[in-house]
Image: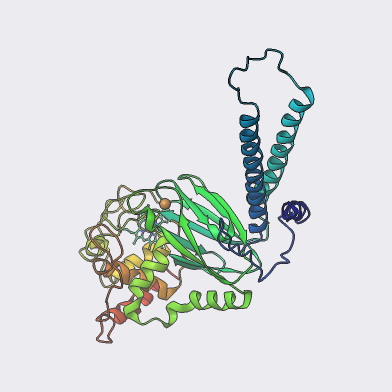
Amino acid sequence: MISLAYKMSALLAGMPSPSEPASVEGVSTPSTFWMPEGASTQAPITDHLFDFINWICYIFLVLVTVALVYFAVKYRQRKGQAFKDDAPVHNTPLELTWTMVPMLLVVAIFYLGMVGYIDLRRSPSNAYEVSVTAQQWSWGFNHPEFGVTQGGEVFVPMGRPVQFLMGSADVLHSCFIPAFRVKQDIVPGRYSRLWFEATKPGSYQLYCTEYCGLDHSKMNAIVHVLPEDEFQAAMGKLATEYLELPESDLPNYALTRLYNRCSSCHSLDGKNAVGPSFKGLWDRTVNGETTFQNGQKLSDLIGPGKDYEMPEDYIRSSILNPQAHIVQNYAGAMPSFQGQIKERQVTALVLMMKYLDRLVDEDGNPIEAPDLSDIGDGSGGVQEAGDAVSSAAAKGNGE
Ligand code: HEC
Ligand SMILES: [Cu+2]
């Protein structure tokens, strides 16, 4: 009872408001029989309320059971005893008590639950933003501030509110990070928000908690909470990693780090969506088979002195200047990635299209650890193409 009273007062006094700066850095709530370790500013209020409700259940379970057994024994009908019809049928103070006490408890639970809920729903305006894409059966995390995309894991700063702006590429999913005590459904066709402020560095489980098809159980990711300086360093490294990667790693880099900016419109399995599928795009481009809205054929546009010196130029231009030539049967719905995707990243995307067969299987699912070590070995091909891409496109786009 003492611990219950203590918890209640802690709950009432320590109600964190969304804008309140964190005073609990490096602090976590230890794991209990019921709950995993808590590592966010929201964890204490959730745990206290959970304990509060739990204790009410324990206490009433004991009270009711003991009273039940006691009365059953004490007032049992004894042999030869006649049924008394002058037994009391009504007791106003007793009835008021058993109505008022539960009502007060329920109102308290409602109040505490609502305060916690509002706090969970209202993200602080200064939150660090991550846009999250849920799809069958993976998680993509994009950091607009750094121009970095992560898949399957995400870095977040400690001691700073973080907001996930979440969307689904297909069906209903739900994002759950048990250690932070946050959970939010992701409904297709609308954005959902979730926010938390992590209080302890470490790696925490994130998983989909809405059954979303065959491999739902594999739809997991890890949230890495890093102290601010380590976070900045890690993000800076991710933002520039493509500059250091060898040519042979670029295709897979594009697939894992860049493609999810395209995935809402371009599939890898041959199904055309808002835009044409990337599957077969390379061959179609090299053979000049693509037809445009104005009836022109790509084969007439590729070649020395023409719009596109090499097939690579066409793909580069499609990314940086998508409105130049619109593919037949599609609307000019593609945004320009000028300034958002750097030169070497464009090269990576071009290489991804070129070697797509070796990066994904028939159904467009990524092949684990693809080996492309034979490309970009200095024997020509790729490197030259990359150079030609830049020079010819500079000419073609009048940059
Ligand atoms: C909002 C939807 C959308 C996004 C996001 C998008 N595209 Fe497109 N893309 C299109 C549409 C629509 C077309 C066809 C019309 C056209 O040619 O502009 C297209 C065409 C293309 C083409 C030419 C296709 C062909 O068959 O010749 C390439 C290459 C391309 N996109 C690459 C990309 C890359 C790389 C990304 C991600 C970095 C991307 N797109 C993101 C909608 C999108
Ligand atoms: Cu899911």
Pick the front one: 346 or 372: 372
Where residue 117 sits in the image (x, y, percent)?
Answer: 65, 47
Residue 146 visible from this viewpoint: yes
Residue at the (30%, 47%) spot, across then down? 329
Q: Quadrant of residue 78?
A: top right
Where residue 137 sits in the image (x, y, percent)?
Answer: 37, 56
**Above or below 75: residue 226:** below
Pick the front one: 78 or 241: 78
Residue at the (39%, 48%) spot, across then down? 212
Pick the front one: 318 or 77: 77
Looking at the image, residue 18 sits to the left or right of residue 218; the answer is right
Which residue reaches farthest bottom?
Answer: 378
Ligand 1 falls in quadrant: bottom left
Pick the front one: 319 or 273: 273
Where residue 209 sits in the image (x, y, percent)?
Answer: 46, 51
Residue 340 visible from this viewpoint: no
Looking at the image, residue 85 sits to the left or right of residue 298; the answer is right
Residue at the (61%, 59%) spot, across then down? 196
Where residue 316 sits in the image (x, y, percent)?
Answer: 36, 67
Looking at the image, residue 162 sits to the left or right of residue 131; the answer is right
**Above or below 93: residue 246:** below
Q: Quadrant of residue 252?
A: bottom left
Which residue reaches farthest front?
Answer: 80
**Count of marks overlaid on the render:** 0
Which residue reaches farthest top?
Answer: 85
Q: Quadrant of the C terminus?
A: bottom left
